[in-house]
Image (tube, rainbow, N blue to C red):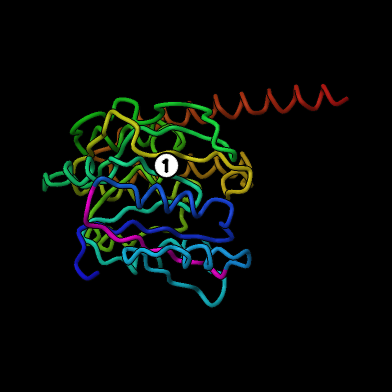
Amino acid sequence: MVGVPVSVCVPAFNAARTIVETIESIRAQDFADFEIVVLDNASTDGTGDLVRSFDDERIRLCTNDTVLPMVDNWNRVMSQARGDLVKLVCADDLITPDCLSAQVDSLRDPEVAVAGAKFDVIDDEGAVLARARGLGNLVGRCSSRRALGAFVRKLPDELCPTAAFLFRRHEFEATGGFRTDFFYAMDIDLVARLCARGRFYGHNRVLAINRASVFNHSSTTSTLSKFSDVLRFNHHARREYRGLVGPVDVLAGDGKVLRQALVRLGARTKHLAGRG
């Protein structure tokens, strides 16, 4: 399938629990012309065999000989894309049947660099934990200033999961792709660099489903590491996008991190006290 309009890229590492459901959600799109690129990161649980079991010419499976670090794996799967537009869907997340058709339409506007959307949250069993989360005030066609200010003021989990974004492949390549500078915030870091080049369009409806899994990387990353990442991203954004991110944005973002850290600390203290 050469020259397809959209590539949906799925980096997968030991994802046998969820990869079939993820691929089925992508295959169910009401948008006709797209490819699914799965990169199996040297899994040992049969992930690749499950992908091969699909009889669908839209699916391309690539395989790493050895396990790559997460950021390298994400960049490699994106490098395999042939579409003009690209989306990265983690191997335990889902997208809704109207996701591509809605977001492709919003990117027909050449001034829009990134489309995002609201999202639901599910657990490992598929039970809904939260509905229609994300975006905040980033609904409709938003300026770079408005988007970048919101990225700094909000925590990454409050905005959109990676599966909720769609953007142009050539602009992704021009930014240098995902980077390790802000690991927990690496998707928001990428979207910030894209939005420095154009507008953000926020769809005020659910187009993606994020799995709050005990198996994914976020769940095994320490709270201190996550919050440290966000603080570093906030201050970097102020330096990098001085005309788009103001000091008040950084103060608001840092305050949000501090409040959340105190909430987590209080919950942990209460838990430890209860055990005692």
Residue 78 place in picture, x, y as percent? 35, 63
Residue 110 place in picture, x, y as percent? 11, 48
270 with respect to 39 (left or right)? right
Residue at image point 22% right, 44% down: 101
The residue beneath circle 1 is 161
The quadrant in which the C terminus is found is top right
Considering depth in this image, is 260 or 117 the residue closer to the camera?
117
Q: Is residue 13 above or below residue 275?
A: below
Q: Is residue 126 above or below residue 25?
A: above
Q: Residue furthest right?
A: 276
Amino acid type of the residue tagged 1 in the rendering: Pro
The image quadrant that residue 35 belongs to is bottom left
Is 118 one of the magenta-colored residues? no
Magenta stretch, residue numbers: 31-42
Residue 236 place in picture, x, y as percent? 39, 46
Q: Is residue 247 visible?
A: no
Residue 43 place in picture, x, y as percent? 58, 67
114 with respect to 60 (left or right)? left
Q: Residue furthest front?
A: 55
